[in-house]
Amino acid sequence: MLELLAEPMGYEFMRIALATSITVAVTCSILSSFVVLRGWALLGDAISHSVLPGIAIALVLEIPYVVGALIAGVGSSALIGLVESRARIRNDTAIGVVMTGAFATGLILLSWMRPTVDVFHVLFGNPIGVSLNDMLLSAAIGGLVVLSVGMLLKEIVAYTFDPIFSRVIGIPTTLLHYVLMILLSLAIVSALNTVGIILVITLLVTPGATAQIISRNITQMIGVSMLVGVSSAIIGLYLSYYFSISSGGAIAGVATAIFFSVLVVKMLKRRLGLGESQADHG
Amino acid sequence: MYSIELESATLRYDEVVALRDVTFRSEAGKMIALIGPNGAGKTSILKMLAGLVRPTSGQVRVLGKDPFKTRGLVAYTPQREEVYWEYPLTVRELVAMGNVRRRGLFRWLDSHDSRVDAALRLVMLEDLASRKISELSGGQQQRAFLARAICQGGEVYLLDEPIAGLDAPSENVLLEILKTLRDQGKTIVMATHDISATLEIFDYVALIRNGLVAFGPPKEVLTSENLANTYGGSTIALHLDDLERVAGWK
């Protein structure tokens, strides 16, 4: 057993892949709790898709792809808000329009430029191709997310629970909203190499969703979410090594499997009357 | 000095006039009910008082100031449906949110603060303090919201439809707490689409239908003519609780 675990770690690329995947999982699953509680799953999906044209434009302008991805991510969240209020359409419709439009723009740009970047890797991740620089970037982003959430936790909780109250009591909610959008965009950029921009939404939704099933308070929820995210990253990466399957797919697949296992256990417990005694809702 | 003051306040959203030329004022230590059908502009008045929107023309003042400069002194309680009650918070944590601006960065909500205890006591939720908020009844959720406002320590309380969907006993408990706050000198502004006998306890009633139909003490304002002008329709029976349904507004 120990040998099975140790063998892949004999390769440097696997050590880097594992370290990066764990960092990314921590980054995404901290934010995941708020994505789930505020109902931002689809918004997160839109931001991640919008990152594609950002990368393409960054390649054209020869600026760091992080910068392009960040501007595109935050820009798309602002554009969604604008479309929603000006066109007076529902939020999910605005997201659908902006998300597919941005993704199409990215595909057009990339197919026209024929860059050296492998589009498949951007879309679905390639952790074993992660460079040392990518790893350091993920670590820096992770540090920033942990620090920001730690610093603003009560403000973020107040805002994601009750935005109107938060604004009236004097929390700068517009600023806080965009700080969260920037953190989300950064988390997506950091996940580019490990799970890719299509599957990153799994890490931004599923750990939080799993944690919500079993948590009583928000700090517990963030902890459980991180545990789910990190376990998925580790197990997924090993599965991909031994079975030669897509690592992004394996990581996302493990997270999904954990979610359904927890849900089934919770349902069984309730059916058998083992769940905590809860008062009737209503 | 008036506690709240609207002077010819008009609010437009693009081409739509939500409120036209609303003027009324109240001194501190009063309870004011904003009454009117859904979409009549009650929430718009609350939002102007809360400093969430500016009137397109006219003036709104709270505690003698621009509402955008009264942060912390005004407590706003949105409609219950506006928040996600499955959010993993205990009652105590929700109430402690009222303290959020008193604590510095990197610090979590202090839910064992004496203000939190006092607020919980006032709304009679001490026994449920460690419950999850999703496990509360509608009336208890509303009282928890109110406790958060009390913990905040505001002078003006703006409540959007706090009694909607509550049964009579829960409604009475809530109104009793509001009376206590009024007696402490707080100003209470409550929006409601229900007309019931309990409105008698309010000092002023403002009938709203995209503008001000009438304003004054309930006995003078709640006439069948005024109510007909507010809700539409020609004859309206006061004893019917849910006028909206009867008048075909829903």
Image (cartoon, coloured by chain):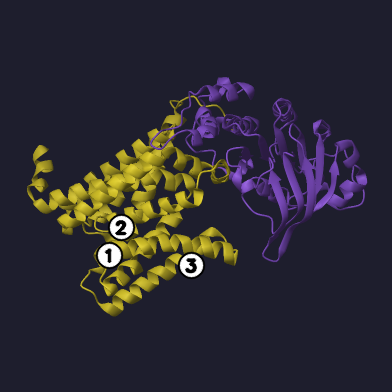
Chain colours: A yellow, B purple
- Residue bearing the label numbered 2: A189
Mark 3 vs mark 1: which is more N-terminal? 1
* Residue located at (37% from left, 38% from top): A222
Q: CB atoms at circles 2 and 1 under 8 Å apart?
A: yes
Q: Can I make out residue B112 in this image?
A: yes
SS of the residue at dot 2? helix
Q: Quadrant of the N terminus of chain B?
A: top right
- The vertical placement of B250 against A281, above or below, is below
Q: How many marks?
A: 3
Crowd class of label 1 (few under 14; some 14 to 19; many from 20; radius 10 Å): some
Which is nearer the eye, A219 or A178? A178
Which residue is rendered at x = 62% and y = 40% of the image?
Answer: B76
Could you tell me residue B136's position as x and y percent? 58, 30
**Residue A65, label in figure:** 1
Secondary element at image label 3: helix
The mark found on residue A97 in the picture is 3
Query: Which of the pair B125/B184 is nearer the observer?
Result: B184
Q: Quadrant of residue B95?
A: top right
Q: Residues at marks 2 and 1, common chain? A: yes
Q: Position of residue A40 (x, y in %)?
A: 46, 52
- Please give the chain letter of the residue carrying mark 2: A
* Same chain check for tags 3 and 2: yes
Camera-nearest residue between B40 and A230: B40
Under mark 2, the amino acid is Val
Q: Nearer the viewer, mark 3 or mark 1?
A: 1
Amino acid carrying label 3: it is Val
Which chain is home to disc 1? A
Compare residues B238 and A257 and report the one nearer the observer. B238
